[in-house]
Amino acid sequence: MADDCFAHPLLAALYDPLDPDRSDLDAYVRMAEEFGAQRVLDIGCGTGVFALLLADRGQEVVGVDPARASLDVARGKPGAERVRWICGDATRLRPLRVDLATMTANVAQAIVDPGDWQATLRGAHAALRPGGRLVFETRVPARRAWEEWTREESRDVTEVPGTGAVETWVDVTEVAGPLVTFRWTYRFAADGQVLTSDSTLRFRERAEIEADLTAEGYVVEDVREAPDRPGREYVFVARRD
């Protein structure tokens, strides 16, 4: 299931204007180069920012996401015809043979159900050619990133063309073991409308993730730091033999 911020047409259209700095994707572009990946599966592609970055570089990309509204935004962007867009998830893909599968940003953590997580790893494994790699990031639980997710720390006002000023902030609503639930609030200055979107992330320990990958037939090649958030996130590189 997609969160409202990805599935609601109005909020999906705001996703890129409210988060314009996607320099976090630079590391994934470099890894695609490092591994010589020509065919890429972007799991949880959202509004298509990363998929289109790769397509612009001549790579063959399949973008899959359960949020139709986000895919509608992606399909409306210049160059979108160069990407194959699929509304769904990695558990029910037609046969693929890609060099690289990715889950950028919060995608891996947003798959909170253990069964869904295992099925996603299995689906990515099936889509990879022998020797292909799965790459994804996840926050280091010990850093307790959610403690900074407060209205005071996150409140911002963004002037969005065609929409006007949009005030946003986030509040954590529940911490239950490895699960952290939080609510984004969007207030539109033009008409006073207020929308909210609830999300839950699972904070997995490194050893747990390595065991999950091994159980699904991967070899954990490397665990790196996110260049833009050193010490705060793991970046897993797992190979299908």
Image (spheres, rainbow, N blue to C red):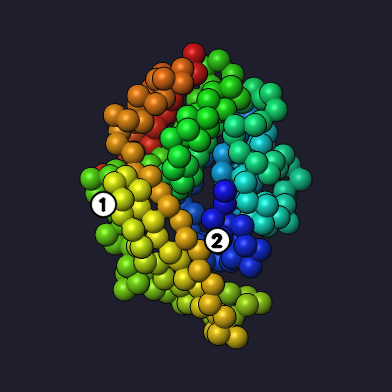
Separation of disc 2 and disc 1 at Cα?
23 Å
Q: Is residue 36 visible?
A: no
Q: Which mark is residue 144?
A: 1
Residue drawn at (61%, 25%), measured in percent from left and top? 127
Q: x and y percent of residue 184 in the render?
A: 45, 66
Looking at the picture, tell me which residue is in the foreground, 112 or 60.
Answer: 112
Read off the residue under disc 2. Answer: 5
Q: x and y percent of residue 75 in the render?
A: 72, 52
Query: Marks 2 and 1: CB-CB under 8 Å?
Result: no
| Type of amino acid at the residue the image marks with label 1 | Arg
Say which label, 2 or 1, has the lower sequence index. Answer: 2
Dot 2 lies on which element? Answer: helix
Q: Is residue 53 above or below residue 15?
A: above
- Quadrant in the picture for residue 4: bottom right
Q: Left of 53 or right of it: where is 198?
A: left
Residue drawn at (64%, 55%), measured in percent from left and top? 70
Q: Left of 54 or right of it: where is 137?
A: left
Q: Is residue 210 above or below residue 51?
A: above
Looking at the picture, tell me which residue is in the foreground, 2 or 76.
Answer: 2
Dot 1 lies on which element? Answer: loop
| Type of amino acid at the residue the image marks with label 2 | Cys
- Quadrant in the picture for residue 136: top left
Residue drawn at (41%, 71%), measured in percent from left and top? 169
